[in-house]
Image: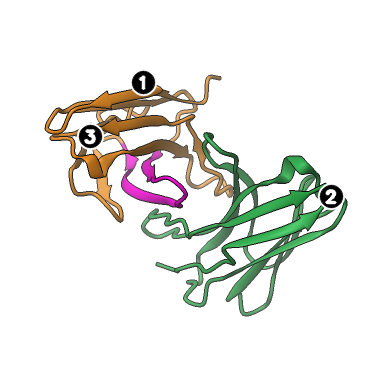
Chain colours: A orange, B green
Amino acid sequence: NAGVTQTPKFQVLKTGQSMTLQCAQDMNHEYMSWYRQDPGMGLRLIHYSVGAGITDQGEVPNGYNVSRSTTEDFPLRLLSAAPSQTSVYFCASRQPGLGSYEQYFGPGTRLTVT
Amino acid sequence: LAKTTQPISMDSYEGQEVNITCSHNNIATNDYITWYQQFPSQGPRFIIQGYKTKVTNEVASLFIPADRKSSTLSLPRVSLSDTAVYYCLVGDSGTYKYIFGTGTRLKVLA
């Protein structure tokens, strides 16, 4: 199992550009989520999904869109990048209902917006 | 959603036991408590979970009092490689909205 994979590892965008951060998991997990982590800070929940076709907002959803068309993939779209979105983005997955609350995190995407 | 509060930072020496306490006064009946470890430039890694009393695995113990308003992560005999940020997370089993707190930055000294 590859676990949770994220692409790209690094990205530099100019203000106003759009892009999609990719996240995939091969564990057949129903629950997936996106977090951002600013330098020296904790993780903040952006969006999450409890299954294909179902998404919901987290703490800081503004400026980001998500969709979940398959169980495996949960892309995060930045519509018009702003310097305030410079951060490291982590994707996570978990399988509810098995008695374990462990979330599996990807390696992160480091995004810089100039 | 249960909000968590942890000390910002702690220092310890190699070989000592480290206890990190997390406060979660508004925890709901169905919520579980999980702890994660994060090294620089990596995603968080699950350490342990619990609902009440004491849970132990190969790397840590978790103590949860009867009122469940706090929990304590215990790391036995820490080494330099345990230097990391530790997060307490209270799982919202109803909405699946998992909110991280600020974490505790543990520094282990030689």
Residue B50: name its quadrant.
bottom right
At mark 2, the secondary structure is: loop
Residue at (48, 71) in percent of width and height? B28
Vertical relation: A38 (above or below) A91: below
SS assignment at label 1: loop
Please indicate whether residue A64 sits to the left or right of residue A7 in the image: left
Q: Nearer the viewer, residue B69 or A43?
A: A43
Please give the range of residues in magenta: A31-51
Residue A112 falls in which quadrant of the image? top left
Q: Which residue is mark 3?
A: A67
Q: Name the residue rendered at 68%, 75% in the picture.
A: B65
Chain hosting mark 1: A
Q: Amino acid at mark 2?
A: Glu
Pointer 2 chain: B
Tell me where residue B103 appears, x and y as whole percent.
54, 57
Most foreground residue, B22 or A96: B22
Which residue bears the numbered disc 2?
B14
Report how far apart the C-alphas of labels 1 and 2 lie in the structure.
37 Å
